Amino acid sequence: MTPVSIFNDVIGPVMRGPSSSHCAAALRIGRLALDLMDGEITEVLVEFDRAGSLPTTHESQGSDMGLFGGLLGWNADDERLPNSAQALADAGIKLHIETVDVGDPHPNTYRLTLKNPRETHTLIAISTGGGMIEVIEIDGVPLRMDGGYHETLIWLSKCDADTLVCILGFSEADKSVCITHDLGDTQLIQIKSSQFAATSDLKPISVKKLSPVLPVPSRKDLHVPFTSCAAMLQHDGDQNTPLWQLAIEYERARGNFTEREVIDKMTGIVRILRKSIASGIAGTSYEDRVLHHQCGRFAEMMNTGRLLDGGALNRIILYVTALMEVKSSMGVIVAAPTAGACAALPAAVIAMAEAMNQDEEQMAKAMLAAGMIGTFIATRWTFAAEVGGCQAEGGAAASMAAAALVTLAGGTRDQAIAAASMAFQSMLGLICDPIANRVEAPCLGKNVMAASNALSCANMALAGYDPLIPLDEVIDAAKAVAERMPREHRCTSLGGLAVTPTSLEIEKRLASFKKGCGTCACH
């Protein structure tokens, strides 16, 4: 497995849409599918397994929007995404979406059959959480592709030994990962590299080149200093290095960055988030959503002293709401670690840092500390609510935010880890049950709860409270809880608040509106 990257898996992608597991991941899958077809698609069949999460959520939670944008070659933050269905039709691409009974083991599985006048290919991929993906099959051949490499696929006859020698020679010289797939009379050579394999002098049956879709690329012989919290503590020993510095050490190894590049990259993300918060407070509009603009009124009452005195927590609630409203209006957000839980961590960090008169670089360092906690979660488990319920999203966000807040306060490495452990412990068992099949409510309340929990646990850790259970064990416990959680409570819109009479009525009203205006998503 390629090691997790803070900027690939934890803090990011920069995107539009209600769900990173649905929209951003689907877009990346679509981009790879477009490359598989050499940039030309005239017809696509999309199949979802009946027992998975996507038959009931693919339209309302952004899978369609993202997938169509990817098939058109767009980026995850493209302003045209809400209208990608119409754009796909305008491009002359025939679309078929079907529900099938195939028993896919992962709930977020996309089965694509792609056609153009010259060829037909199939691709199966899964969304693993937070916008991350894995292609698991192309044309019936099991393989692995996560979007981090330049992928060159070369089909050739088994008797074409000279071509194979040339390919293997390139792979060795370029330090590429070369995998041979036996297809009977032919073979598929998969080359993972930092650049595409040179094929002009070869005579293969077919060649396909799929570009990376992740911001931090992968490379052969990639090593990181640690992959678990226990291993990090062993690595650091008695040095008690601040968590944000350990995060920089990790990401420098993972992405081949300098320290300055890591800080600047996170500072850039902080600036995107602050701009989104400001736009949310100013007001957003989007018809196809459950909750409309509310944070403006909260800001007015907070600024005139008409709310209960919550100190910095009131500013955190305001910023959480602003980010959630931007997300629901198809504005630009950062999945941190997911779109459904995009607000708790950045709102807590930015609001508290502003209250403490700290600058953007200090915010970035706190976000890096959070990212370090997130790598441990992503490595051991998942951020996907479809797999783990909201404990995988809101629980992870609370854990990460708690460590970040301790970092803002100048707390130690061990205090940050203690806060992360306590915050995650408090969120075990949290289900995912979006009202009206939109990722807005109770998601707003759960983001507020995650941020409030993070603040409480940060202060408890600073005061020396004992978390009792090590962070790695808490993550493993959350995974074990998820394995026993009913499918209906894992982002399928089949349980909890999602199936209350009021939720179903709201969903019906929104569906009628969309049908009446004739678009998939109207402003």
Image (cartoon, rainbow, N blue to C red):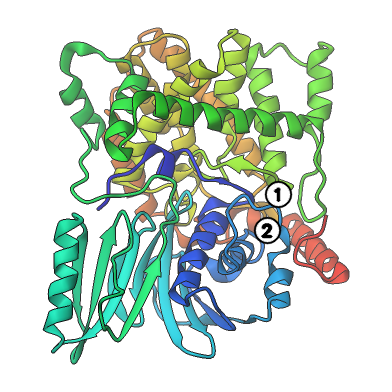
In this orientation, which residue lies closer to the viewer: 211 or 347?
211
In this orientation, which residue lies closer to the viewer: 100 or 143?
143
Q: Position of residue 133 (x, y in %)?
A: 42, 58
Left or right relative to 300: residue 390:
left
- Asked if residue 414 is positioned above or below residue 195 in the image, the reply reads above
* Amino acid on which the number 1 mark rests in the picture: Met
Q: Residues within 10 Å of mark 1 (few under 14, many from 20)?
A: many
Outermost residue to the front: 201
Residue 340 is labelled as none
Q: Are marks 1 and 2 in contact (CB under 8 Å)?
A: yes
Q: Position of residue 69 (x, y in %)?
A: 61, 63
Q: Residue at x 33, y 62 (%)?
A: 196
Left or right relative to 444: residue 33:
left
Q: CA distance from mark 1 to mark 2?
A: 8 Å
Outermost residue to the right: 516
On the question of residue 342 being in view, the answer is: yes
Q: Position of residue 134 (x, y in %)?
A: 37, 61
Q: Which residue is mark 1?
A: 330
Q: Earlier in the sequence, mark 1 or mark 2?
A: 2
Q: Mark 1 or mark 2, which is nearer to you?
A: 2
Q: Which secondary structure lies at badge 2?
A: helix
Q: Which secondary structure lies at badge 1?
A: loop
Q: Which residue is mark 2?
A: 81
- Asked if residue 327 is positioned above or below residue 421 in the image, the reply reads below
Q: Position of residue 359 (x, y in %)?
A: 56, 13
* Amino acid on which the number 2 mark rests in the picture: Leu
